[in-house]
Image: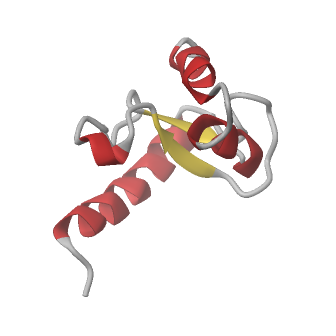
Amino acid sequence: MIGKKAKDWIKAKKRLMIEYEEEGITVCEACGGTFAMSFHHLERRSSGRAKHTFEGTRLLCAECHDKADNRPGHREFNDKLKLIR
């Protein structure tokens, strides 16, 4: 059974896909890559402050998404992502 938060995120992802395409953003916003694209929240979803919006997310490739979430220096990398647009 899928919880409410998961259902909300599934709906938001569909809306975000359309919004990003309309804005012409189809490659990784950090490096320009195209492999395994996904949305990265600028605020961690577990914090309760994450926004499922165009302004609250960035489109990243798998490599950059890993950098943003897990690697040493992820806070600095996220600070740079906030300045992209």
Splitting the image into 4 quarters, where does residue 67 fall? top right
Q: Position of residue 9 (x, y in %)?
A: 33, 59
Q: Is 4 rendered above or below residue 77? A: below
Residue at the spot x=51%, y=18% of the render?
82
Locate the N terminus and report the quarter of the image it occupies. Answer: bottom left
Q: Nearer the viewer, residue 71 or 5?
A: 71
Q: How many marks?
A: 0
Q: In the rendered image, which quarter is residue 13 located in?
A: bottom left
Q: At which x and y percent is residue 18?
A: 47, 49
27 vs 48, nearest the viewer = 48
Residue at far top of view: 83
Side of 44 relative to 4 (left or right): right
**Left or right of 8 on screen, residue 70:** right
Q: Is residue 38 above or below residue 40?
A: below
Q: Is residue 53 left or right of residue 41?
A: left
Point out residue 22 in the picture as x, y percentages from the top left corner: 52, 38
Q: Which residue reaches farthest bottom?
A: 1
Residue 36, how many percent across, how many down?
A: 72, 58
In-front residue for pair 47/5: 47
Q: How is the image coloured?
A: secondary structure
Along the line of sight, which residue is nearer the eye, 37 or 47?
47
Residue 83 figure quarter = top right
The quarter of the image holding the C terminus is top right
Q: Residue furthest left?
A: 4
82 relative to 33 in the view: left or right = left
Name which residue lies at 34% across and 46% down. Answer: 45
Q: Residue at image x 26%, y 80%?
A: 2
